[in-house]
Amino acid sequence: MEIVEATEAAISRAAERLRAGAVVVLPTETVYGLAADATNARAIASIFATKRRPRFNPLIVHVPDAASASRLAVFHAPAQRLAEAFWPGALTLVLPKSDACQIADLVTAGLGTIALRAPLHPVPQAVLREVGVPLAAPSANRSGRVSPTTAQHVAQDFAREEGLILDGGPCLLGLESTIVGWNGDRPVLLRPGAIARGDIESVLDCEFDEAQASGAVTAPGQLASHYAPRARLRLNASALRDGEAFLGFGPGVSNATLNLSPSGDLLEAASNLFAALRSLDAADAEAIAVAPIPEHGLGEAINNRLRRAAAPRD
Ligand code: TXA
Ligand code: MG
């Protein structure tokens, strides 16, 4: 794929390609996304082909704002409150599709629900407004690989594919969006992500239901092994073993190959996580030992991604 700086001209070129049914890689505040017209089934099929995703898992549909989202899904009061509080931003809401919803069935994997997000990043905002259709966009990595937080990561994964990558610099948050759904009237945290559980619970004024959402899908973000680097991962490591690279966290770590955040800041650690895994992997370590990461705030999402990266591969 070809990296181009996300200038106004490049944004118009991207919108034109998207309207013609091509896939285009866009930066967002979470991770880079492989976008296509969500109303065009052929375009969506090429997302799966490009990612070499083995199964048709449901994709997140990106819209410029809550008004556009309300044409695609049925919003109840708590969903509306979350959209007001966190959109545009790193929150994805899974809601019943509206009758007027013209999204290709492949996007929702035939489910009656749709996952919606209004991104904050100015580049997808500009593309969405110019293209005038909702865009489905999974993370722009080859299936099973670590999510990309720079245009260069994307180019590494898709060296042989045709296509445009709009370069908007490194992603500010560096972790995928938090996904919230409902089990009847009880909110469910479907995927921990760039917005911490507690921040969402305080807007909802209740805690998430611990049970799985009814009709929950086995989607890549929920598979045990995902976000996998080539090297094996050993979590909660206190001492280093031979042949290991060490991914540290916090102060007082002297032998780290890389430190996710020397000051112990979870936001900084989240934004560095995927780039760190990619760079340690490129350094050809046999295994990567990872320091313990506290489970509070964004630590929940960081540990979730680390556990998946460490899980046995299928
Ligand atoms: O930050 C993000 O969310 C990034 C950027 C590009 O926006 N996108 C992303 O998309 O992570 P993707 O396709 O990798 O993740 C889609 C996840 C699925 O794994 C699944 O967990 C959930 O969204 N999902 C989508 N539709 C759903 C539905 N109808 N019901 C339940 N979960 C759904
Ligand atoms: Mg992904």
Image (cartoon, grey):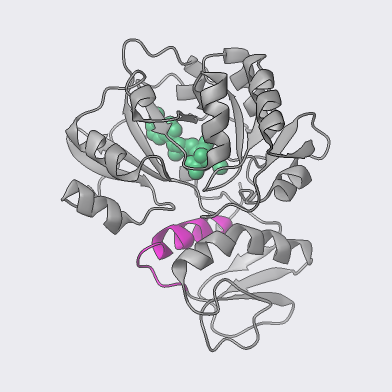
Judge left or right: residue 233 versus residue 183. Answer: right
The residue drawn where x is 21% and y is 54% is 202
Q: Is residue 282 magenta?
A: no
Q: Estimate the x, y position of residue 207 in percent, counting from the top left.
A: 20, 52
As drawn, 80 above or below 275: above
Judge left or right: residue 255 versus residue 107. Answer: right
Quarter of the figure with residue 69: top left
The residue drawn where x is 29% and y is 44% is 85
Residue 52 appears in the figure: no
Q: Residue furthest front?
A: 8
Q: Is residue 130 or residue 194 the one in the foreground?
A: 130
Q: Estimate the x, y position of residue 35 in percent, counting from the top left.
A: 60, 29
Q: Which residues are magenta?
A: 293-310
Q: Is residue 283 or residue 116 the one in the foreground?
A: 116
Q: Estimate the x, y position of residue 244 in percent, counting from the top left.
A: 70, 76
As drawn, 195 above or below 215: below
Quadrant into which the N terminus falls: top right
Q: Estimate the x, y position of residue 159 in percent, counting from the top left.
A: 81, 40
Q: Quick check: which quadrant has ligand 2?
A: top right
Quarter of the figure with residue 43: top right
Disc tally is 0
Overall secondary structure of the magenta section: helix
As drawn, 94 above or below 269: above
The residue drawn where x is 54% and y is 74% is 261
Q: Residue furthest right?
A: 160
Q: Is residue 308 magenta?
A: yes
Residue 299 appears in the figure: yes
The residue drawn where x is 57% and y is 62% is 273
